[in-house]
């Protein structure tokens, strides 16, 4: 009796349930309806047994009808079996079995079914009781709020190796991060978003420890989590031993120079990380110098975001040296570099310009909201004419560039054939610089010149050259210049197609 009961609950019921799920019903329709249609068509065209044709219609119809009729009662009967099986998989740390049960029971899209099996998930509930933000909700599983149920469902999905798990803004705190870190040790989850959860250093340390054994996570988003230097150090230690993570986002945390140095050290040995985002932290020039040194050995990083990190000229120069002096066998692969809002002046811009195209074929360079003047712009222009020809996007918005710098960039565009997007808004460019840029940018597709010092003369000059510029598809200028363009019929026609008026 015990064996037969266990066999019924553990094997037969789950097997029957798999045959009546919504996806099974969908597959039956896809498989049988075309077959039945072709059978009837063959009977009408070629003749044949009416009985066989009828069977081809009746059998799949009965199968589909049974899936509708039996779904609810079988589902209700299978709930204890599904819950106990999933609980057993969690207890044994069997991530493969947990994943298989999760998908076979179609728990990904059925939150109410998850709620019904939750009372049988003793192991999971015990783990969740450690989470302060969930302890009160777990006292009464039958009356969970929709938000609490959704959070529990998403955490269980990590244990079940769901590919993408999003916990953005869930207030999970340190305890929630620790539970997820435990799950990651065996989970096959590939994309985990923990943005804005206040996990702090302790949460960062737990996740860092899990990275040492996890071999499946590809993307980890930890922005706005008050992670400091010790949390960053733990994550860096995890990166040294991790061989799967490709994207780590630590934007808007509390990481200082020491944390920046630790992450930099991990870049020297890690060969899988493709994107590192430290935007809005305070690593300063010291942290940037360490990252620059690590770039001399790194051969896989594609995107580095240091926007608003206070790196200054010395930090920019160190990053440039790392790009210039890369000693890895395959060379530096960095393609996108964000260094906006960092107090970088002409010296830093010159160093970065000289590093372009040497051992690094940078495609996108963002230097907005710095202190770059004409000398810096001229250095960038020299690079665009020669070594930096691979650059496709250049952002110099919000600097101190005048006509002199704009003319230098314009001259470089007569020889550069790769730059497609140039942002020079919020500078001090006047009529002469604006005319030169529109006249000489033959392959440039988008040019932004709003909020400069362009007057009527500059607008007329741009209007004169715009119709003959075949490459430019988007010119962004201020709306007050619209009337001036209107006095040139040809320019007005080109303006309708190319100009984006910014009011």
Image (spheres, helix red, strand yellow):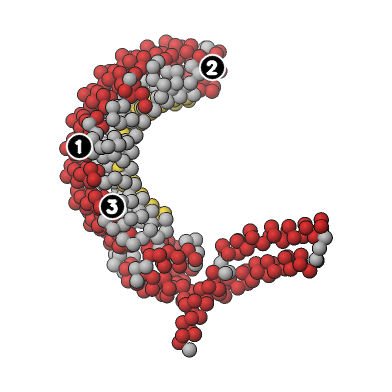
Residue 101 as seen in the image, left or right of residue 311: right
The 10 Å Cα crowd at callout 1, few under 14, some 14 to 19, many 20 or more, is many
The residue tagged with tag 1: helix, strand or loop? helix
Which residue is depicted at the point 23% across and 43% down?
Answer: 268
Residue drawn at (50%, 18%) of the image: 470
Q: On screen, 210 above or below 80?
A: above
- Which disc, if any, is residue 242? 3
Query: Farthest residue toward the bottom?
Result: 1
Quadrant location of residue 179?
Answer: bottom left
- Of the pair 355 and 375, the residue shown nearer to us: 355
Residue at the front extreme? 329
Category of crowding for the residue at label 3, using alpha-carbon neighbours closer than 10 angstroms: few (below 14), some (14–19), many (at least 20)? many
Residue 407 position by quadrant: top left
Tag in front: 2 or 1: 1
Q: Is residue 247 above or below residue 46?
A: above
- The kind of secondary structure element at disc 3 is loop
Q: Earlier in the sequence, mark 2 or mark 3?
A: 3
State which tag comes first along the sequence, 2 or 1.
1
Residue 173, by quadrant, is bottom left
Give the percent coordinates (x, y) of residue 132.
Answer: 29, 64
Q: Which residue is mark 2?
A: 492
The reply to whether callout 2 and callout 3 are in contact (CB within 8 Å) is no
Against 46, is 388 above or below? above
Cα–Cα gap, marks 1 and 3: 21 Å
**Looking at the image, do the residues carrying marks 1 and 3 touch, with CB atoms under 8 Å apart?**
no
State the CA–CA distance, disc 2 to disc 3.
Answer: 57 Å
- Badge 1 is on which residue? 293
- Give me the residue at 45% from left, 87% from top: 2
Tell me, yes or no, if residue 429 can be seen here.
no
């Amino acid at each position: 009796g015990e064996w037969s009961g266990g066999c019924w609950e553990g094997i037969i019921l789950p097997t029957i349930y798999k045959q009546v799920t919504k996806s099974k019903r969908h597959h039956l329709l896809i498989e049988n309806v075309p077959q039945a249609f072709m059978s009837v068509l063959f009977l009408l065209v070629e003749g044949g047994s009416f009985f066989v044709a009828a069977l081809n219609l009746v059998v799949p119809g009965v199968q589909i009808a049974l899936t509708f009729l039996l779904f609810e009662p079988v589902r209700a009967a299978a709930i204890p079996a599904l819950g106990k099986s999933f609980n057993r998989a969690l207890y044994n740390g069997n991530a493969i079995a947990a994943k298989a049960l999760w998908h076979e029971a179609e728990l990904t899209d059925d939150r109410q079914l998850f709620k019904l099996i939750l009372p049988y998930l003793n192991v999971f509930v015990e783990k969740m009781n450690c989470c302060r933000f969930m302890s009160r909700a777990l006292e009464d599983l039958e009356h969970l709020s929709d938000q609490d149920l959704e959070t529990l469902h998403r955490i269980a999905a990590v244990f079940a190796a769901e590919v993408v798990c999003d916990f953005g803004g869930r207030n999970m705190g340190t305890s929630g991060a620790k539970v997820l870190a435990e799950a990651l040790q065996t989970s096959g989850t590939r994309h985990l978003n923990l943005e804005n959860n206040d996990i702090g250093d302790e949460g960062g340390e737990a996740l860092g420890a899990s990275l040492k054994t996890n071999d499946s996570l590809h993307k980890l988003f930890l922005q706005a989590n008050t992670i400091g230097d010790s949390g960053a150090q733990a994550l860096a230690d995890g990166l040294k031993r991790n061989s799967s993570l490709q994207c780590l986002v630590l934007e808007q945390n509390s990481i200082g120079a020491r944390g920046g140095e630790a992450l930099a050290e991990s870049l020297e040995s890690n060969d899988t990380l493709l994107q590192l985002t430290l935007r809005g932290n305070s690593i300063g020039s010291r942290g940037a110098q360490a990252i620059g040194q690590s770039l001399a050995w790194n051969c896989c990083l594609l995107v580095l975001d240091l926007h608003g990190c206070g790196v200054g000229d010395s930090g920019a120069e160190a990053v440039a040296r790392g790009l210039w002096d890369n000693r890895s066998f395959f060379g530096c692969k960095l393609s996108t570099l964000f260094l906006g809002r960092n107090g970088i002046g002409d010296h830093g811009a010159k160093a970065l310009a000289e590093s372009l195209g040497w051992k690094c074929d940078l495609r996108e360079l963002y230097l907005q909201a710095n202190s770059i003047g004409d000398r810096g712009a001229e250095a960038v222009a020299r690079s665009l004419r020669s070594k930096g020809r691979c650059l496709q996007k250049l952002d110099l918005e919000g600097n101190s560039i005048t006509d002199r710098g704009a003319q230098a960039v314009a001259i470089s565009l007569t020889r550069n054939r790769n730059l497609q997007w140039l942002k020079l808004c919020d500078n001090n460019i006047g009529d002469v610089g604006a005319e030169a840029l529109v006249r000489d940018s033959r392959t440039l597709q988008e040019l932004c010149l709003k909020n400069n010092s362009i007057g009527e003369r500059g607008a007329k000059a741009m209007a004169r050259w715009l119709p003959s510029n075949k490459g430019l598809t988007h010119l962004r200028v201020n709306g007050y210049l619209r009337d001036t363009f209107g006095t040139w019929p040809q320019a007005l026609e080109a303006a309708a197609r190319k100009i984006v008026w910014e009011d």
